[in-house]
């Protein structure tokens, strides 16, 4: 049976794309947590790359294995494999996290709201289904 013209490419996995507001809020929460952790080891004023490194590690681990960073969990959104909705895995999580650490690719969105980092890692930010 052929897909209808109005059917979203996200429909097979039942994913609803997360809005830009919750995505940015989750990133800010994660960034503040990473600044706190990095400040235990290095002053953010002297070594600003330390917080970015922590952000890459946290995003690789949490988004890659669990589909959510602490900020995403608080805002009930998740990072899912596109288009099947599964978990990314560490390799794709690392690709996404490194590009997210550059920040500019995250601001270049397509019509589905997927940034360059999401398209490179074959992922999408989706709302967490209600239980």
Image (cartoon, grey):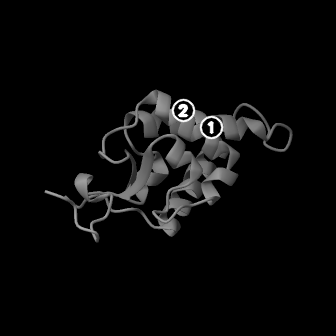
Viewer-proximal residue, 23 or 10? 10
Q: For the view shown, which residue lies furthest in the top direction? A: 91
Label 2 Cα neighbours within 10 Å, binned few <14 / some 14-19 / many ≥20? many
Is the N terminus in the top left, top right, bottom left or bottom right quadrant? bottom left
- At horizontal 86% and vertical 39% (from top left) the residue drawn is 46
Q: Residue furthest right?
A: 46
Where does the image place residue 123, in percent across and percent down from the top left?
Answer: 43, 46
- Image location (x, y in percent) of residue 99: 63, 42
Reply above or below: 96 against 11.
above
Label drawn at residue 98: 1
Residue at disc 2, secondary structure: helix
Q: Residue at x 42, y 63 (%)?
A: 18
Q: Which quadrant: the C terminus?
A: bottom left
Q: Is residue 45 left or right of residue 2?
A: right
Q: Nearer the viewer, residue 41 or 131?
A: 131
From the viewer's perspective, is residue 67 above or below residue 103?
Answer: above
Q: CA distance from mark 1 to mark 2?
A: 6 Å
Whether residue 58 appears in this view of the structure is no
Left or right: 46 as drawn, with respect to 15? right
Q: Determine the secondary structure under disc 1.
A: helix
Disc on res. 94? 2
Q: Nearer the viewer, residue 87 or 116?
A: 116
For the residues bearing labels 1 and 2, Cβ distance under 8 angstroms = yes
- From the top left corner, tell me how far across and down residue 126 is, in percent: 38, 57
Q: Is residue 80 above or below residue 19?
A: above
What residue is shown at x 49% (from left), y 40% (from top)? Answer: 121
Q: What is the number of the mark on residue 64?
A: none
Residue 1 in sight: yes
Q: Residue furthest left?
A: 1
């Amino acid at each position: 049976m052929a897909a209808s013209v109005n059917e979203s490419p996200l429909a097979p996995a039942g994913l609803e794309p997360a809005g830009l507001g919750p995505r940015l809020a989750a990133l800010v929460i994660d960034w503040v947590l990473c600044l706190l952790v990095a400040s235990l080891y290095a002053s953010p004023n002297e070594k600003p790359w330390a917080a970015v490194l922590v952000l890459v590690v946290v995003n690789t681990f949490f988004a890659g294995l669990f589909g959510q960073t602490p900020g995403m969990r608080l805002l009930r959104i998740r990072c899912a494999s596109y288009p099947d909705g599964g978990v990314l895995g560490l390799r794709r999580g690392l690709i996404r996290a490194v590009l997210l650490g550059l920040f500019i690719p995250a601001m270049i969105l397509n019509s589905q709201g997927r940034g360059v980092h999401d398209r490179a890692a074959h992922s999408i930010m989706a709302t967490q289904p209600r239980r």
